[in-house]
Amino acid sequence: MSLLTIDQLEVRYGPIYGTHSVSLTLDAGETVALVGSNGAGKSSTLKAIMGIAPVARGTITLDGKSLLGVRPADVVRRGLGYSPEGRRVFGQLSVRENLEVGGIIIDKASMRQRMEQMFGYFPRLRERASQRAGSLSGGEQQMLAIGRALMSRPRVFLLDEPSLGLAPIVVERIGEIIAEVQKAEGLAVILAEQNAVWALAIAHRAVILELGHIAVQGSAEAMRADPQVQRAFLGLE
Amino acid sequence: MKPRSPPVLLLAGGLAGVLFLVLWPLAWRSDFILYIATLVLQFSIGACSLQLIIRTGHISLSHAAFAGIGGYASVLLVKSAGWPWHFALIGAILAPAAFAALIGPVLLRLSGKYFVLVTFLFGELMRFVATDWQGLTGGSNGIFEIPKPYPAMRDPLNYYWLSLGFSVVCVGLCVRIMRSEIGRAMDAMRESEKLTECAGVPAFRIKVLIFVIACGLAGVQGSLNAHMNNVITPGNFGPLESLNLVVMNVIGGMTNMGGALLGTVFLVALPELLRGYVEWQRVIYGVILIVVMAFLPGGLVELWGRLRGLVTGEAVRGTAVVTDET
């Protein structure tokens, strides 16, 4: 049985569809890329898993138990970490306080240890620990948003559009860190991303969404080689 | 966010302050000043507990009404039921807390201005109830001849010390909450409740819990105040009084307990000291408020920070005012 299973998910905001029918499975230790353009349903899928988007139809289960109707805070307690689109941090809080909020579900002693781990993954955050998060650069804020989500030691990590607006070198670094954390902790990752080249490079499998439907799916390797995908999503001829 | 001062320093500063507050009347006794100081101490409980609610992102215009519920509960338990004051005080905490637990889960779903409006209406409603339920509350004349908590409290100095003790405990509790994990989560919630929920914080449960605690603490103010004045009337607990508690926090910068204390001194002591100029009081208030909001959005505390910044050459940011995006 898969760790996380999504079956025929339909997200609807009143008359507007977020997704029509999205199905995917996720196992421990693997990265699945959700690729697609704006409005394809990537963010809606992640939000539905977190319980902050209205699910009209379909199921989402973690360890075989439904996540539908579970409050976001309890979804986190069940083992999900979420780093939303737009590198959202608590701008008025310091870097350390941001991480502390992310670690609220773990006990005090392991919080300190976990924070040290985060500073190990993101040395820049240690340097800026007592700075206001709002004063960080874009790349640093993205790292903080990721660090905050990882504080609770999630088993499944939902990462929404981490490359948006960042310099290529920062994006590359983020990819390395995700791989590093995954290797160390056996984390399962869903990466929602417009930058298909990058996403397919770091993911094991990929699902390409178009207007709320699944267009193509398969191993990332096969997709990188697929001429149709190359033409439509990778900008290669 | 301002750097948090180390707990040891805070504790030492707090202890020194309390020691001074305990001892000064022994060195120099003036019953008028003592009366004002007692009022300030009582209102500090209301102002600081209201700040707890403000810091979850909600501005309540019914906090004085909850103090009133506590006040009436305390007075009725002592006068009609014949309870000793210390038991009645427990009632004065539990009654508004129970009320808050009842309406909080509904009220706290409202955001921003709607919460303000509905709490305003609730405050008015409580005032109507207190005015019209004459059999219980004595109507608009209120309840007279309220006994002091203990006979020794007839001495204003003793009453001052009693209020000081409760103020220290209640304000200390508020400070403790804000310095805890929950306090951090509250500061995060004010920026974005949804994002805080997604970080694993049960934001709504915390809001309800804090609302209940804060309203319970307001009851302490209500009880102390009623037994000091010997009389309790509905007028003391209307929206205008609630607004005063909000203004105390605005003057103090909304997100700082020290600021709320400063605001309380300002707003309670000033009218008493300006008694000779009653017709000017509101004008002076208004001008001060406008000046503070226009030039010191972080409150009087920011003035201190800026002065210190001038000396040390450090730039100071304004503190964020309550925002709500959900």
Image (tube, coloured by chain):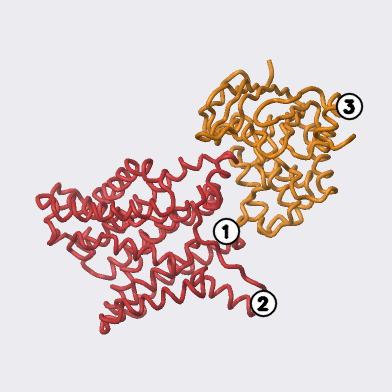
Chain colours: A orange, B red
Q: Is residue A1 above or below residue A36?
A: above
Query: Going by the image, does B192 lie left or right of B79?
Result: right
> Tag 1, which chain?
B
SS under mark 2: helix
Say what amino acid the circle numbered 2 marks: Thr
**Can you give x and y, in whole percent of width and height, for residue B33 in the image?**
31, 77
Residue at the disc numbered 2: B312
Q: Quadrant of the N terminus of chain A?
A: top right
> Tag 2, which chain?
B
Q: Is mark 2 in CB contact (under 8 Å) with mark 1?
A: no
Say what amino acid the circle numbered 1 marks: Pro
Q: Quadrant of the C terminus of chain A?
A: top right
**Can you give x and y, in whole percent of width and height, for residue B220 in the image?**
31, 55
**Can you give x and y, in whole percent of width and height, for residue A141 in the image?**
71, 51
The residue drawn where x is 18% and y is 63% is B230
Residue mark closest to the camera, 2 vs 3: 3
Label 1, residues with CA under 10 Å away: few <14, some 14-19, many ≥20: few
Label 2, residues with CA under 10 Å away: few <14, some 14-19, many ≥20: few
Give the Cα separation between the discs numbered 3 and 1.
60 Å
Residue mark closest to the camera, 3 vs 1: 3
> Tag 3, which chain?
A
Residue at the disc numbered 1: B7
Judged from this view, the residue extending furthest toward the left is B135
Q: Upstream in the sequence, badge 2 or badge 1?
A: 1
Say what amino acid the circle numbered 3 marks: Ala
Q: Is mark 2 in CB contact (under 8 Å) with mark 3?
A: no
Q: Nearer the viewer, residue A236 or B36?
A: A236
The residue drawn where x is 35% and y is 53% is B217
Residue at the disc numbered 3: A225
Query: Going by the image, does B287 lie left or right of B186?
Result: left
Query: Are discs 2 and 3 both within one chain?
Result: no
